[in-house]
Image (cartoon, grey):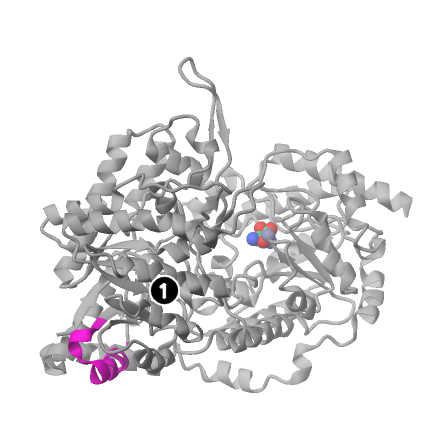
Amino acid sequence: MVQSSVLGFPRMGANRELKKATEAYWAGKATVESLLETGKTLRAAHWKIQKDAGVDLIPSNDFSFYDQVLDHILMFNAIPERYTKYNLPPLDVLFAMGRGLQKKETESSPAIDVTSLEMVKWFDSNYHYVRPTFQDNQEFKLNSTKPIDEFKEAKELGITTRPVILGPVSFLQLGKADRGQSVTPIDLLEKLLPVYEELLTKLAEAGAESVQIDEPVLVLDLPEATKKAFETAYSKLGKLSSAPKLVLATYFGDIVHNIDVIPSISHLYGLHIDLVRAPEQLSDVLKAIGDKQVLSVGVVDGRNIWKTNFSKAIGLVESAVHTIGAERVIVATSSSLLHTPHTLESEKNLDPEVADWFSFATEKCKEVVIIAKAVSDGAETVAEEIKSNAASVTARATSKRTNDAAVKDRQAKITEEMYNRKSPFPDRIAAQSKTLNLPKFPTTTIGSFPQTSEIRVQRNKFTKKQITAEEYEKFIEKEIDDVIAIQEEIGLDVLVHGEPERNDMVQYFGERLHGYVFTTNAWVQSYGSRCVRPPIIVGDISRPAAMTVKGSKYAQSKTKKPMKGMLTGPVTCLRWSFPRDDVHQSVQAEQLALALRDEVIDLEKAGIYVIQVDEPAIREGFPLRKGKERDDYLTWAVNSFKLATAGVENGTQIHSHFCYSDFQDMFSLISNLDADVLSIENSKSDAKLLNVFKKEEYPRHIGPGVYDIHSPRIPSYDEIKNRIEEMLQYLKPEQLWIDPDCGLKTRQWTETKPSLTNMVNAAKHFREKY
Ligand code: GLN
Ligand code: ZN
């Protein structure tokens, strides 16, 4: 019999109860008991959903108050001393590592001021984990019994679960040496393994029959030492006399390039692979696993919101069954469902046509069960479900939304010229200096100005129809008038309208494009208590009407200085949405690019001669491994930006913005965009990173951020001046722009005005000097 399993369930709750409870606790408005109680209630509810769906292998220890990797840091006592010295309760230590802690001195306790551990993207998802941070003399011990406690908790509810733990190789490999330390994390393996042995033994004693041990690093390019670590770790853990059956789980890619690691894990009970992301790995893995091991096949997408195509999934599972027998196959979600929203039930406003195409976490649990049943008991036992699934799949494939002939026709007609500006940069910049007439060291900002509570109040009123579209528009125009007046007073050179009308840089455009839909409650965890609600690309994308032209034109009419038009780039629109899974991402990026191209050209026609197309997400789309996928990405990501921007005349200046500074591995991508001006984050990193622009003789203009916009601190004139001085070691005076790190929407006016004034004055200093 084929079993069904889920690798992890979202933690936040149907109505983000966990977010509300943790934030109330942080704000001192709720007790630790009530927070713990919320956690317990949510775990019980989530187990019950899976139990009711009929899932055979239900995960535990997938719950976390902040992040699952952080839980392991605490559990293995890999806690830097700066967090332990205050003798805080464990949960507070956990939060201090996750988000930092600042507390004033009281009679009974000293002042506390610690920053958080580093937070990094979890592979190529939009989830972020807390990075383990090790000392040269690192020791480990079992410091918490969370997996055991949660296993017992479920057992008391009558549910036998399969605990999930992060494997030792991934735990180390995903970590780093603490500041001032030089340890190579993987070298700590021998010290760490006894703690895993203890944990697994205790889980067995508590009654756990099997354990899911996550080793997602197996999908990456691994150094030899890390590959060897698999052998060391699993020859030990696999041979424990009293351990549960271990299923080693990989996800977000294929493991074929690391297939030589398989023999060292082939004595474990089972292996899980992601067949949604990499179906072609099945035959290689089947050959490699030997004649006993169980294979868990991830055929239900843990990263997206689409209904599983049952006939395809059943076909894959059957081919595994055919080779190794039903007893050795488990049907599973491709990864944890952490990356999907809780339930489709909460969506009351979706068009029924598209709602029929979706499946969120709760629905996906039912999908694994149906697929397992179809394979075990025969398709006829779930005939109804298979029939209705096939109907949804056909409806989606044949819908007008996914088959817009006009969009496809336009894509087919894209020509080589459309990717390239009319002339090379030297001609363009000459033309631009005539149109724009800018001083040396031109100053600008990245787009948004403070989103005041007044702006949010008015937007809310408008959404709730408490004010008319006209009233709202008047309000927005007044906001634009104000930011223009302020920018003129400060003396900035290229102005912006301040983006007061934008709720979110992707949602704003998605709402104005065909091919997108929006949910009301489909939140997914981004990090800690923070959740995002990505728009969904459901069909071919096109632009029914201009999106920003009216606003930009209005803004330009209010000033003699150049007004910068502000758009979100195709890759960022794609990356921060749930993409389609029926066409390649490059196709979707190209459609977005064509829509944006029209907008760029319309802006130019309306007299906007500086246009910024933001691509802050272009880096995170970078495929995890070297090779074809990455090379292809470099081509299509760059092409979509060029397609969006290259339709303008030489005298129109294209800007782009990126929220990170380390370009070493991305330099060619950034350079190939051929943007006239780049603004990048730089103030918090070493100016030396700019050396790549010097070394590669980057020919175009660039504005590395001169101050950090994430902090309320006001940078002084001298500080900015010194920063610019440093930049001039790497960049030529005639190519340097002066701007902040990113948009100012999260700042207050009281910080923004003096900061920008100091910035403009610093630029003036260099204008006189050069
Ligand atoms: N133009 C956007 C802003 O200023 C850019 C935001 C971003 O880079 N994330 O807010
Ligand atoms: Zn930014």
Q: Residue at x 32, y 81 (%)?
A: 287
Instruction: Name the chief secondary structure element in magenta.
Output: helix
Q: Position of residue 562 (x, y in %)?
A: 75, 55
User: Which quadrant of the structure image shows residue 630?
Assistant: bottom right
Up-down relation of residue 708 to residue 326 (above or below): above
User: Could one spot residue 464 in this view of the protein?
Assistant: no
Image-based side of 427 in relation to 365, left or right: right
Quarter holding residue 1:
bottom left
Q: Position of residue 540 (x, y in %)?
A: 45, 76
Q: Position of residue 75 (x, y in %)?
A: 33, 42
Mark count: 1
Tell me the magenta residue range. 309-330
Secondary structure of the residue carrying tag 1 is: loop
Q: Is residue 66 above or below residue 576?
A: above
* Residue 232 percent location from the top left of the image: 38, 60
Res 750 quadrant in image: top right
Q: Residue 550: within the magenta?
A: no
Between 142 and 438, the one nearer to me in the picture:
142
Taking the spot 42% from the left edge, 18% from the top edge, the residue there is: 109
Q: Is residue 607 visible?
A: yes
Residue, disc 1: 303
Side of 481 where 135 appears, left or right:
left
Q: Dot 1, how many residues are within 10 Å of its Cα: few (below 14), some (14-19), or many (20+)?
A: many
